[in-house]
Image (spheres, rainbow, N blue to C red):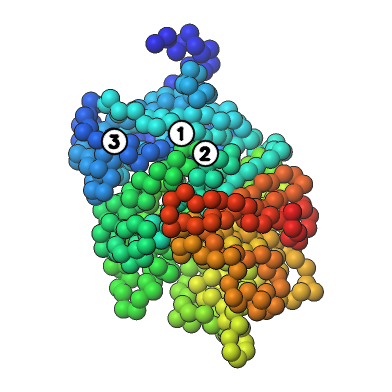
Amino acid sequence: MPSMRNLLGSDSTSRRQFLAYSAAWASVPFLGQATRAAEKPRFDDDPFSLGVASGDPDHRGMVLWTRLAPQPLQPDGGMPATAVRVGWTVAADEGFKKVVAEGNTLATPQLGHSVHVELNGLEPDRWYWYRFHVGDAVSPVGRTRTMPLPWVQAEQLKFAVASCQNYEQGHYTAYEQMAADDLDLVFHLGDYIYEYAAGRNGRVRTHHGPEIESLGDYRVRLSQYRSDPLLHRMHAQCPWFVTWDDHEFDNNYADEVSEEAGVDPRAFLRRRMDAYQAYYEMMPLRRRSLPAGPDLQLYRRAPFGRLAELVVLDTRQYRSDQPNGDRRSPLNEAALDPRSTMLGREQRNWLYRSLTASRATWNVLAQQVMMGMVGYSTDDEPLNYSMDQWPGYAAERIELMRFLSERRVPNPVVLTGDIHSHWANELRVNDLDEKSAKVATEFVTTSISSGGNGEDKPSWWADMKSANPFVKFHNRQRGYVRCTVTPETWTSDFMVVDQVLEPGGKTAVRASFVVESGNPEINPA
Ligand code: FE
Ligand code: CA
């Protein structure tokens, strides 16, 4: 192998050493309990069975991720209870001829032998390739990118929005098309796993084990999902911004409150601690998201040049309990209670500060539950609303719409998951007051697999449409939303898969919509 010094100028060499140095520091907090690191570990099975991933990019770097798991369906991944040294390499080309950074870090049993390498000295707005090695084993190659400089207007950003991938209910066919879309980024908005026992939703394949409750259970479930080759491959395509919804822990939970009555909040938080830790271990998250007991900070923001401010929210960890017993209900006093919160005070203040400070053309709120106040008709008036979504927290939702409107936040676009169906919504302070000004645009992505094949339009669509004129599109098949953003326009393609119960389904654009900068109106493309 030719010497690196010959291939690279001295500048690049010192950058490489700097990166190795910062990566070494990244593992220091876990050194305390680490016993002697195995320098030359041997594996009977591929330790990189879970593949590689990258995430949370900025203009200088991103997180590179892997997790050693020769036996992914064992709680310890089939790894010894010792720390293992893992090497990593970053190159400016796919063939690794121009290595720009390399180093090594410790994968510790305390964090499930996960590896999170945070890079901080790369060039803005360009693609990189990376891989890991341990002993004689070399990982698959991942592709990742840095963001443009925050003060530079970028020409285009192309990304996908995904959510809800129940392993038992369908194949991850949508990721096959997504991998061919040549995207800069992926947002995953939650329900990355489901906590349910094997067979509960069984259609096409089966969960491993009973409902997950312990750290080992959550690790195994996340590993089982990540072993899917299509998901695994998409993670290697480009960096992801991930956030969770409820099923990463427990259906419809609200902070320390279970959906089931009589669950001790302390025991519930103990379980949450395990769920959150396993989530951190499996995701390409920065050290700022390292869990602390039952808490993990997931809300964060990242500018894509001056083109888009990407704000990622967490609407589960801090919310007050759903009003009206979690069920659909009219907008009664409980749903309109000004003390109810989806975001919690700290996150809400941070969000308002971030939006005030943003200089971006498009301000993107990537979050979980539907903001459009969709009312469902009943036999007798009034309309019913989902209490697990923003209508259950209507006062905070109205306040947020007023804030966006009064502070003239440019081009707010809300990205949403959770409900296993596509929606395009024009948002107002009061969505039903058609004479009032439109404030923001919402694109809700359907599920990757949850719910099976689904259908194009439900039988009740006509009633729904007339009760909710701000809804511009709806579809209940599987798929994702693909967005192309320029300084002038935002285009959303609603992608649908013809079927997910067998492998090999076909993915196509079902409908495309355009929003022009300066006007939150949704128009057919
Ligand atoms: Fe879901
Ligand atoms: Ca959900």
Residue named by callout 3: 47
For the residue pair 243 and 375, the one nearer the viewer reads as 375
Q: Secondary structure at mark 3?
A: loop
Tell me the CA gap for discs 3 and 1. 16 Å
Q: CA distance from mark 2 to mark 1?
A: 8 Å
Q: Position of residue 379 (x, y in %)?
A: 59, 89
State the residue in front, 138 or 331.
138
Q: Image quadrant for the C terminus? A: bottom right
Residue 434 position, x and y percent, is: 76, 74
- Residue 110 seen from this side: no
> Does residue 521 sit above or below 70 in this rendering?
below
Give amino acid for label 1. Answer: Gly
Instruction: Name the residue tied to disc 2.
Output: 238
- Label 1: which residue? 142
Q: CA distance from mark 3 to mark 2?
A: 22 Å
Of labels 2 and 1, earlier in sequence is 1
Residue 146 position, x and y percent, is 56, 34
Instruction: Name which of mark 3 and mark 2 comes first in the sequence.
Output: 3
* Quadrant where the N terminus is found in the figure: top left
- Residue at 62% from the left image edge and 89% from the top image edge: 381
